[in-house]
Image: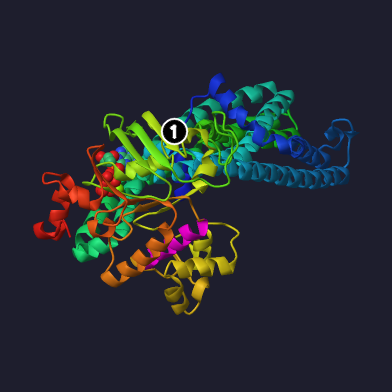
Amino acid sequence: MARHDQSAEDLALDRLPKASLNRESLREALSLYRYVRPYRWRFFSGLATLVVSASLGLVFPLFSGALIDAALRPEHATVPLLGVVTLNQVALLLAVSVTLQALSSFNSSLAFNRVGQSALADLRRDCYGRLIALPMAFFGQRRVGELTSRVSTDIAQIEGGLIDALPQLCRQSLFLLGGITLISLTSGRLTLVMLGTLPILIAAAVFFGRRLRRYSRETQDQLAATNTIVEETLQAIASVKAFANEAFEQGRYDRANTRVLAAALSAARWRAVFVAFFIVALFGGIVIVLWFGAGLLQSGTITAGQMTRFALYTIFVAGAMGQSAELFTQIQKTVGATQRVRELLREPTEVGPMAAAPAPTGPLPSRLEGAVAFEDVSFRYPARPEVQVLRGITLAARPGEQIALVGPSGAGKSTLTALLLRFYVPEAGTLRIDGRDAGTYPLGWLRGQMAIVPQDVLLFGGTIAENIRYGRPGADDDAIRAAAGLANADEFIRGFPEGYATLVGDRGIKLSGGQRQRVAIARAILKNPAILILDEATSSLDSEGERLVQVALDRLMQGRTTFIIAHRLATIRNADRIAVIDGGRVVELGTHDELSARPEGLYRHLSSLQFGPGETAA
Ligand SMILES: Nc1ncnc2c1ncn2[C@@H]1O[C@H](COP(=O)(O)OP(=O)(O)OP(=O)(O)O)[C@@H](O)[C@H]1O
Ligand SMILES: [Mg+2]
């Protein structure tokens, strides 16, 4: 039978594209069998008990028929293998078979669920591991929300396929084949009548099923549109309120919501028709068969027991046929879901953290000196290959130097630091670290030597102590306190009633911009990197907050090669060198004094905008 009421998740699953079932796609799906493999014995035991339980199910009408015959025409009450039986003997047989059927069903259900859930846990683990190991370029090309929902719906579909559809398919196939075989042994003519009524049922199931799915999908699409509105408005809730646009958003939502309702009601109409038809067809079919059978009974061609047996088999077969369309759709969708999951599992990852680098590596120092050299580096983002972001950047930093990167928005400053972190590989040119091509270091090791304090610090849900410890997992509480002290964060953290155990993130306290930055600085101090990247770390603070952060940063920069991206030029006057980036090139390079002295220079222009023309050389 089709599903009559669908939950939101079912609807989401409904939208999954179906794969055409061919040899190729089936082979793809079967290749996920390796997740079942470790649990195969339990899987086969589930399968075996399923066959036992289905066979006992098929025996049930036989015994029931014999029961009737034992009452009405004892000489006809026969059971295969045992011959003629009495009423009580049949009742006992029935009781035993029902008990065995219950036990075997229990075992097969448990086994399939255990195998399925264990295999899915492994699959989820692999998918997650694969996702976080994918290169940044992968995330640039896809929307993360879409990716996560895709993985979760696909895995839910595989779960349904493995735990429900597959065992059901086995069971229903056995019922169908066994039922038809056993009926035809009873009466060939009745079998023909029954088989004659079934194709109509199947055709109708397919017809209505298609209609229903179309409207379900429509509903789902409209629902997704309303969810997008909710997401967008909640993300920008401060803007919605500041512009007093609640009514506008409510109107937008209402219109989308009305469309959901309309689609859902169309679907509901078809579903109701479908249900009504199915009842007419199923029961009508049974009535026809019973009517015909009753005629045979009247003329004495068959016994009442045979008639009972026959009616029960008809119900079995009709039930199996009715489910086949739904099951087939389920299997198709599962195959589709496995294809997409396999695509994900096949995506090439970054060279795994701590894995050997591709080129010969040589012995690794315990710590980098921190010499960084960009040599004629060019780069385009894989997601936007038509835009040349960096065009032949040459820039070197000696160990411990502070290099400031300034320039207009979109010039390529953050991109340069992304290359340094090896989120991306240069398209041309070389990045050398301590004189060695950066590509020859193991990726995880190299990143372990660097730290970044981004402008917009995102803290993980958890305590403040845990967030600082992210810089060096395993660091003890004293080390965390010391780092927080150097970062000027200790004081405000102690000011909270729960101190370092204060929860931050979604369900915790919300730290101010400057406080979050100081937590990020403490994290970086704890990591003790050789190379440091500060992306506009002081841009959004008041002067007191800025002073606290600046002092903390000055401590952090001590003895480390630092790249500072700054829009506020006051913060970088003391930098060893300032590189002015424009249009993906280094257009000026020198100290604050040197660059300020160039009358036509971009740096002088930028600083005159910030300090006024008279103050540029100050
Ligand atoms: N992940 C990305 N995928 C595609 N293009 C990107 C990506 N990140 C940045 N870009 C593009 O690369 C160019 C340089 O961006 P980048 O972030 O390096 O600029 P920026 O100098 O840091 O600017 P700002 O000072 O505003 O932070 C921009 O044109 C930007 O649109
Ligand atoms: Mg930037």
Q: Nearer the viewer, residue 434 or 582?
A: 434
Residue 167: where, in percent of width, then height? 66, 37
Q: Which residue is mark 1?
A: 17
Q: Which kind of residue does numbered mark 1 sit on?
A: Pro
Image quarter of residue 50:
top right
Q: Which residue occupies 74% across, 47% down?
A: 106
| Visible residue check, residue 240 | yes
Q: Nearer the viewer, residue 609 or 117?
A: 609
Residue 538: where, in percent of width, then height? 31, 61
Q: Which residue occupies 52% across, 39% down?
A: 443
Quadrant of the image for the C terminus? bottom left
Disc 1 packing (10 Å; few <14; some 14–19; many ≥20): few
| Visible residue check, residue 54 | no
Quadrant field for ligand 1 = top left
Image quarter of residue 240:
bottom left
Which SS type dominates the magenta stretch? helix
* Magenta residue span: 515-527
- Is ligand 1 closer than 8 angstroms to the Cβ of mark 1? no
Residue 103: where, in percent of width, then height? 78, 47
